[in-house]
Amino acid sequence: MTDFGIKEALKTLGLKDINEGTSTGSNNFSNGELIESYSPVDGKLIGKVKATTKEDFEKMMDTATKAFKSFRNMPSPQRGEIVRQFGNKLRELKEPLGKLVSYEMGKSLQEGYGEVQEMIDICDFAVGLSRQLNGQVIPSERPGHIMREQWHPIGVVGIISAFNFPVAVWAWNTSLAWICGDVCVWKASEKAPLCSIACQNIIAGVLKDNNLPEGISCIINGDYKVGEMMTADTRIPLISATGSTRMGRIVGTTVAQRFGKSLLELGGNNAIIITPTADLKVVVPGAVFGAVGTCGQRCTSTRRLIIHESVYDKVRDAIVGAYKQIKIGNPLDETKHVGPLIDKDSVKTYLAAIEKAKAEGGNVLVEGGVLTGEGFESGCYVKPVIIEAENHFKIVQHETFAPILYLMKYSGEVENAIEKQNGVVQGLSSAIMTNEMKEAEKFLSYAGSDCGIANVNIGTSGAEIGGAFGGEKETGGGRESGSDAWKVYMRRQTNTVNYSDELPLAQGIKFDL
């Protein structure tokens, strides 16, 4: 089977030959046990990365804190120039990095390229933002006084990212943190460690070319124990963590105990409401891509379709028919729509969820199962599943990171559908398909969707970087990427300046001596 250019991509990114299975350029702060990275595409060993020990972590933190002391004094537009150069390097390396993302994580090649494009886009956004980190002037109640608000760098930002977006989420955080004057320490998922090393190689070259300290960007490798070093460290004022709700509870609690800040991007249980006026030409691709894209391993993946009873049969048949056209296989082959799950543990979770849905009374419309034979040797390829279910089923209430789509009916007005959509503990992404303005506006109103993302006539998956990304309830409440998400990476300071010859006190208080 052809390697689709993976060997050349690894070499271009500064990683060793795929067949060597040896250490692949781990960073200078890793001397622990080797972590092996196997591709879910073909089950082959891509390379080995050294885990970070406690001693390594201390050296890395010393390097990062020293780098911050100088980096924070660089004018923000100059920091933006560094991010601009990084974005240009990503443009040059979009093809090999996109292939690595696809091969190590298992998402389709188009999605791999798209993830690198997200990195480029957020770099462009950050460059413009580097000249707009605006405070404000506030009217003072006292004559001869002026109040203003300033924003200052916060320090070392710790980033914990998940396997499903092994490079983009880091870029969302780090590009903004850098222009804010912060330095970053990144713990990537141990399921996709080579992507982090490739990114570190790219930014390390940019920093070296500009005679800047390497501590501006650091990576650490390992399992949750390495993450615990970060979350408990008082030298890291902000932890940005993407992952499961279970992980978020641990991180949030630990960071709060030391009065640090946390930015949490956790689970989603996303629904599309389909009303009687919905256009099937929009519904079908939006729902199908949302459900099977990245093999159902996006936090914004579509888990539930809430369909009005008057159009239920028509929508159901159209979605089931579309599933028959899905092509599953090597994600580096651009004729395939769906690649593998990340590993065999995820396959077990997928199979168990199907059985739980059946046990609760679910009706399977499109059968699932594990694919075997030529091209599926890794054991990680599964069939996307459609199950008729009820919103109250325990398994429906739970986020399963796999291509399982639940169909359910609603009757009456759109408020009934919104109530079902909101009837889960997660609150990330949501959508409504309708050509009725009143329904759309009700969905977007204060009494509508309770999610951080609410879309009309597009699916739940595929957010642009210009808007703040994140959700409510057990999704964690964090916001990354666009809008004013940059503020979390800075500390706010209120200044009052007295330029008069008197000292009047606020609230008219008299204190005469």
Image (cartoon, grey):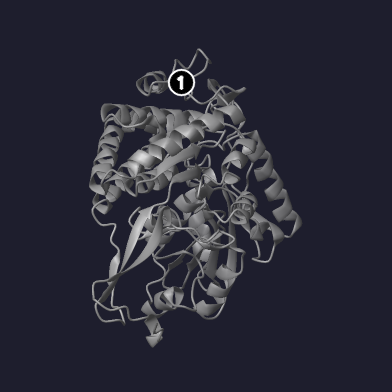
Q: Is residue 49 visible to us here?
A: yes
Q: Residue furthest top?
A: 20
- At mark 1, the secondary structure is loop
Of the pair 316 and 362, the residue shown nearer to us:
362
Which of the 4 image quadrants contains residue 113? top left
Instruction: Give the residue at x 56% y 68%.
Output: 421
Of the pair 173 and 177, the residue shown nearer to us:
177
Q: Residue furthest right?
A: 359
State the image coordinates of residue 18 (x, y, percent, origin top left): 47, 17
State the image coordinates of residue 133 (x, y, percent, origin top left): 29, 57
State the image coordinates of residue 23 (x, y, percent, origin top left): 52, 17
Q: Is residue 482 visible to us here?
A: no
Which of the 4 image quadrants contains residue 212? top left
Instruction: Give the residue at x 49% y 67%.
Output: 273
Q: Is residue 308 above or below residue 61?
A: below
**Left or right position of 43 against 290:** right
User: What type is the residue that disc 1 sits on?
Assistant: Gly
**Left or right position of 136 against 360:** left
- How many numbered discs? 1
Q: Name the residue beneath numbered marker 1.
A: 25
Q: Local crowd at mark 1 within 10 Å, few (<14), some, or many (≥20)?
A: some
Of the pair 317 and 439, the residue shown nearer to us:
439
Which of the 4 image quadrants contains residue 88? top left
Image quarter in which the C terminus is found: bottom left
Q: Is residue 445 above or below residue 407?
A: below
**Left or right position of 91 against 346:** left
State the image coordinates of residue 207 (x, y, percent, origin top left): 32, 31
